[in-house]
Image (tube, rainbow, N blue to C red):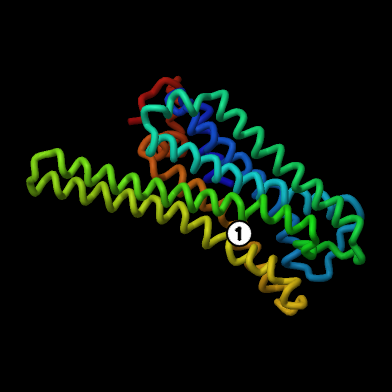
Amino acid sequence: MCGNLLVIISIIYFKQLHTPTNYLILSLAVADLLVGVVVLPFSTLLAVSSCWHLEGLLCKVRGCFDIFLCTCSILNLCFISIDRYYAVCQPLRYRTKITVHVIVIMILVSWTVSALNGIGLTIRGLNEEQSNRCVLFQRLTSLGIMGTFFAYYLPGIVMFTIYLKIFMVSQRQVRSIQNTICQNTKSEATISKMERKATKTLAIVMGVFLICWTPFFLCFTFYPLSNYTIPVSVIASFKWLGWSNSMLNPFVYGFFYTWFRTSFKMIISGKIFQGDFTNFKLV
């Protein structure tokens, strides 16, 4: 919650951060913040008390917001990868292709599709529910398979393909620079540093997403195929690992950039309350 709040305050307060890319990161931070505020308190009660029952609407609302906000977070990550693709692979067309209008459409699609996914799966769960006990996840149905596909597998495939393409283009650009500049020890060291940084950044971005969400969605998908033999506690643990992605996103998408680190220091130190720093140059 604190990390996502820092990202939200930074982007809203500092005018330098009012860019199309950062609007996507803002949308991601809002979704992740709501996961911590709305979903996790009730999920914590479920984890602590195995006999806890939520009668009626409250349990359904928790499940709906769980699906809605987690899907929204993943879709925002997917659209961020598309933004990065145009920035790296088609830099000359980036400003004409990725405008504020396009970013707004991306954000609306993320939140609308996620809301429909959460509401649809929750309504289907109400029709098929046979127990009054509140659970962390419903059994997978035909509608659930479709929801899972749009919530994880499709965005995951898109992200993996795009980041692989970005990595290949980045490597090609580095080799092109290496062939056109004067070869000396200093330039080779600089290029080697650029190559390592690009590799590490893409590996962390994709690695964090896959590590956090893949175990849950694989177990959730194969749960019916295994004749429901996978322990529910195992799937629940993997669900908590997936939720942790909302905690790690501010570090992955915020702390990588110098201007975010500078804005975080100014907010935490209380410097922004000592004057008007909205136009302050963060880099």
Image position of 155 with respect to 226: above or below:
above
Q: Secondary structure under badge 1?
A: helix
Please identify the quadrant where the C terminus is shown.
top left
Where residue 256 appears, x then y in whole percent?
39, 45
Where residue 173 appears, x then y in whole percent?
27, 42
Q: Is residue 199 left or right of residue 97?
A: left
Residue 273 in sight: no
Image position of 41 with respect to 226: above or below:
above
Q: Identify which residue, 62 or 141, lies in the foreground.
A: 141
Q: Is residue 111 left or right of residue 133?
A: left
Q: Residue at x 90, y 60 (%)?
A: 128
Which residue bears the numbered disc 1?
A: 242
- Total labels: the figure holds 1
Rate crowding at label 1 as few (under 14), some (14 to 19) or many (20 or more) other CA atoms within 10 Å.
Answer: many
Residue 139 image-quadrant placement:
bottom right
Q: Residue at x 43, y 35 (%)?
A: 86
Image position of 166 with respect to 99: above or below:
below
Residue 180 in sight: yes
Q: Amino acid at mark 1?
A: Gly
Q: Residue at x 59, y 62 (%)?
A: 241
Where residue 110 appears, x then y in whole percent?
64, 39
Q: Is residue 28 left or right of residue 70?
A: left
Where residue 115 appears, x then y in whole percent?
74, 42
Q: Identify which residue, 241 or 167, lies in the foreground.
A: 167
Q: Is residue 14 left or right of residue 113?
A: left
Q: Residue at x 44, y 40 (%)?
A: 85
